[in-house]
Amino acid sequence: MMSLSFKPRILPLLLLLFFYACNEQAPPADSQPAVIEIQTSADSLSQVPFLYAGANDSLCLSWLRQVDSTNWALEYSVLDNDNWTPVREVMARSDLFVNWADFPSIVVGENGQKAFHWLQKSGEGTYAYDVRFKLERISESIVPHDDGTATEHGFVSILPQSGGGFLLHWLDGRNYAADKKEMTLRAARISSDGAISDEAIVDERVCDCCQTDAALIPGGSVIVYRDRSDDEIRDISIARRIGNEWEAPKSIWDDNWKIAGCPVNGPAVSAHGAFVAVAWFTGARDIPTVLLAVSKDGGANFDVPIRVDDGNPLGRVDVEIRADKSIWVSWLEQEAQAVNIRLKSFTPAGNEQSALTAATTSAERRSGFPRMAATNKDLYLALTDVSGGKMQVKLARVRLDSKM
């Protein structure tokens, strides 16, 4: 396949299932960022996109493509200087676990080495699957956990490590094999040649099926996730890894959301040095809410969270901090008969700067979780478009004013 080049186009304002800019609850229209559709190499049978911003403003986009009734392929392409590299296939199999909320990822290491993960069935049970991790230029995938149980392992977050290699975090269901109905959060390092080390239990009891997210901070990293107390309080916790040591997890804020089952609605984190932002959804007191909390000391302490949503959120959040420490939050908002992907930006002090609608989507599970990534110049948003009965990965670029 030849490299694909294109000229981005600003989309018509009234197209409901594509991208448009909007000036509600925001500064005047002439100061609003423009949302531009970016053509991708993902075909009409693609879904569950993932974005990763690499070096020199490059953007990695991965997705799953349905090959036929039983086979799926994990594919990716890199946007570099407005040109897509040829689509590369990471693997294609008939035994993948494909799920709207638990999706594969792509990450680029310090030395430019790409790493991928996906989920692969390990037994006959619906939720019997393993994490599979693959390094670029190494043919075989590896399993970071060694329990060998046909239980759930997923909701992975991967970080590049200084000097090469990667740090993996995942939810691990091995305790279910012993009839202990508790999910754990675990982590392990994988070197650039595939050696596994430093496996650790980060938290012994967490929510079963909410996404995790991780970010690098000076001297270490943080992982955020939905916790689970003995009396079923499922608020958002953070654990910090300083050097090679994990600190005890702690709650970011006491929402006190008591819920008997998993809401499948995990948090998101971004960091710029020691400046850390965490966004999440809560249904505490039967009031659906998206919150944003900021830390100035690498996640050790957080300010009182601010409310982000417009009054009727569905969650599915993401967050990005740009180089100027402005914070962007995305989430799904139910508005009249539409479900919109909303974006808001905030100053480092938490003051709202911009608010816009990036796309109209669906509340259906198959629409998945929109993903964001920020380069030095722009903000990108990937989603699964489910209009017309088909599923296809779409990408938008938010053109940001140089002052933002």
Image: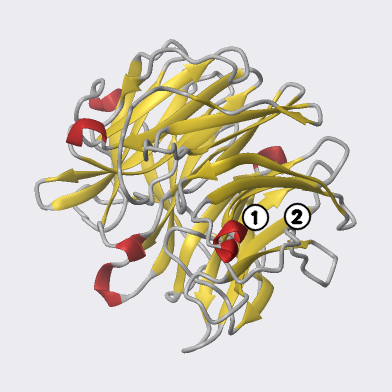
**Mark drawn on residue 114:** 2
Residue at the far bottom in the pictured view: 69
Number of other residues with Cα within 10 Å of mark 2, as a class: few under 14, some 14 to 19, many 20 or more = many
Left/right placement of residue 108 relative to residue 257 reads right
Residue 36 against residue 222 in the figure, above or below: below
Q: Mark 1 points at which residue?
A: 106
Asked if the residue under mark 2 is in contact with the one under mark 1, i.e. CB atoms within 8 Å, the reply is: yes
Left/right placement of residue 217 relative to residue 312 reads right
Residue at 47% across / 62% down in the picture?
48
Residue at 80% across / 27% down in the picture?
243
Q: In the image, what residue type sits under mark 2?
A: Lys
Q: Quick one: SS at disc 2? A: strand
Image x and y of residue 105, in percent: 60, 56
Image x and y of residue 83, in percent: 61, 56
Q: In the image, what residue type sits under mark 1?
A: Ile
- Badge count: 2
Image x and y of residue 202, in percent: 65, 38
